[in-house]
Image (tube, rainbow, N blue to C red):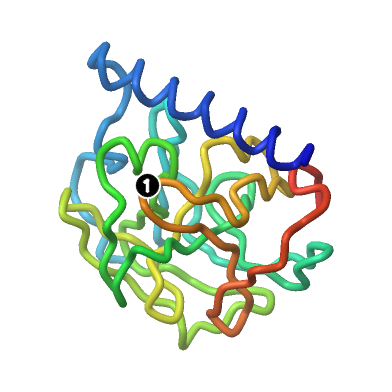
Amino acid sequence: MRHHATATTAVAAALLAATATACSGGGNTSGSTSGSHDTGTAATVTASPAGQDAQSTPATVTTKDVSPFGKILVGGDKNRTLYLFLADKKNQSTCTGACAKVWPPLLVNGKPTASGGADSKKLGTTKRSDGGTQVTYNGHPLYLFAADTSSGNTRGQGLNNFGAKWYVLGTDGKQITTSGSSSGGGY
């Protein structure tokens, strides 16, 4: 029950921050960066946690062993936990607007790379309705969760937000539905 209350509080705080940013006109509302697209081999990734400007980091999807989930996908700034959204269709994101503030898409300029136990053959991209390019894994668009403020947080696991559930992904590209007893903890 404590996990549910903590997750609910985290979601409420993220929603409040997203609403405040949207209403004030501040912050990066698209989650994408401006400028030319990189045509070289180096890639950058952007993700905009609610109320913060996008930051660019190497676009590498990697893995971490996280109890009780096993190996899950991580990436973006600080190698945070990556999630799939059950409302998405294969290679097509349905999370936009306020949803993308709480669940920032993992965006990339260039080609994303895989390391650790992540399978480079499952890694790809899809064009978003806002014009950004989102990283996919096994056809699932990838997202961060705004309430996961540091590496090791899995506060979004199993939440039902914006019409469907959110789950971490294993290296096979499939959702892991196990509930964590300490989803706010570290790796």
Mark 1 — residue?
Answer: 162
- Residue at 58% across, 35% down: 147
- Residue at 20% across, 42% down: 35
- Residue lying furthest bottom: 121
Residue 61, given in percent of the width and then of the height, sits at 55, 66
Left or right of 7 in this view: 135: left
- Residue lying furthest front: 1
- Residue at 27% across, 41% down: 33
- Residue at 40% across, 72% down: 140
Residue 79 vs 52, above or below: the answer is below
Left or right of 19 in this view: 151: right
Amino acid at dot 1: Phe
Residue 167 vs 136, above or below: the answer is above
The quadrant the C terminus occupies is bottom right
| Quadrant assignment, res 53 | top left
Residue 55, given in percent of the width and then of the height, sits at 44, 37
Q: Secondary structure at mark 1?
A: loop
Residue 167, given in percent of the width and then of the height, sits at 56, 62
| Quadrant assignment, res 111 | bottom left
Q: Residues within 10 Å of mark 1 (few under 14, many from 20)?
A: some
Left or right of 186 in this view: 124: left
Left or right of 164 in this view: 77: right
